[in-house]
Amino acid sequence: MSADNKSPYNAAVIGREEINPQLLVLRVQPDAAMFDFKPGQFAVLGLLGREPRVPEAAAEEPVSEPDKMIRRAYSISSSSVERRYVEFYLTLITSGQLTPRLFALKHGSPLFLGPKASGVFTLDRVPPDKAVVLIATGTGLAPYLSMLRTMLVNETQRRFVVLHGARFGWDLGYRGELESLARLRPNFTYIPSITRPDQDPHFHGRTGRVQALVEQGVVEKESGVALDPAQADVFLCGNPDMVQAVKAMLEGRGFKTDQPGKPGTIHVEEYW
């Protein structure tokens, strides 16, 4: 390959699992050594505009330039001790530039992976004696997977709670893994919830919006962890309406949102 034809890609897909047609778990292996990252951080994925898109994608307007790299940041869902690949939990945005191309990738397909991870949505600012309540909708679950897969191996005292909301049971990615973790780890509680139970009669679990469940005290009832800023820090990731509603509710109970240079007890990842 001549220098002027050098591929801009530096990684390849080594695993893909469709949770459903709109949700994808993608494992990406860098060609060079893996970068270090902290659970909760994100990395950049990229593809050229010439790459194919899935058939269900909406018409692209304007059409992407074929030789221009489309880059987006996505939270990493794999453990930080995993050295072979980074995993991402993606939702298909049919009108988007990048996800319709990422969904079209096959096993072995090349792509661009940024050389480092970034972000401060980590457990660094949480005192070790406090519980951690991780609240998400949709693929906002991704950074929490990384935290749990990394921390629950050794953390046997600190309490972890995941409250995850989606429309249907089949939208609850990683549900089997999280249910297994909850059975194996007495310090971990998993609370899945769906908002359209009338269309998913086989789902047996909590129903309703995440913000309503927080207000109803479901976190305390299921886990025994008090939503008290002296005892727990809360992480929020996902739908902006959920984030705003839960944040306002928690601030009413004395929680404080992170400010630059001033760590609080609410940590937010703006997802879209």
Image (tube, rainbow, N blue to C red):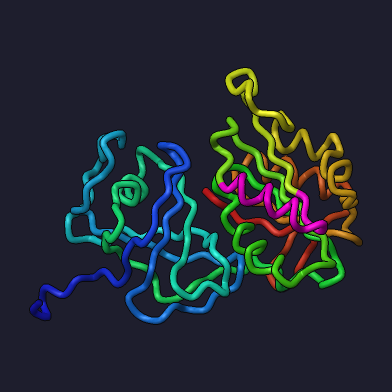
Residue 19 at x, y = what percent?
47, 42
* Residue 190 percent location from the top left of the image: 73, 47
Residue 111: where, in percent of width, then height? 30, 63
Residue lying farthest to the top in this orientation: 198
Looking at the rendered structure, the number of numbered marks drawn on it comes to: 0
The answer to whether one can see residue 126 in this image is: yes
* Residue visible at 36% across and 38% down in the picture: 94
User: Seen in the image, is 170 located left or right of residue 234?
Assistant: left
Residue lying at the far left in this picture: please name it: 2
Is residue 180 shown in magenta?
Answer: yes
Residue 63 sits in quarter = top left
- Judging depth in this view, the residue of 18 and 165 nearest the camera is 18
In the image, taking residue 203 as reference, residue 185 lies left or right, namely: right
Q: Is residue 225 rendered to the left or right of residue 194?
A: right
**Quadrant housing residue 8:** bottom left
Can I make out residue 233 in this image? no
* Predominant secondary structure, magenta span: helix
- Look at the image and give the residue range highlighted in magenta: 174-189
Q: Can residue 239 be found in the magenta stretch?
A: no
Q: Residue at x 33, y 45 (%)?
A: 100
Q: Please state, as top left, top right, bottom left or bottom right, where the N terminus lies in the image.
A: bottom left
Q: Residue at x 36, y 44 (%)?
A: 96
Q: Quadrant of residue 130?
A: bottom right
Across and down, in percent, residue 105 comes to 29, 52
* Residue found at x 26% / y 40%: 60
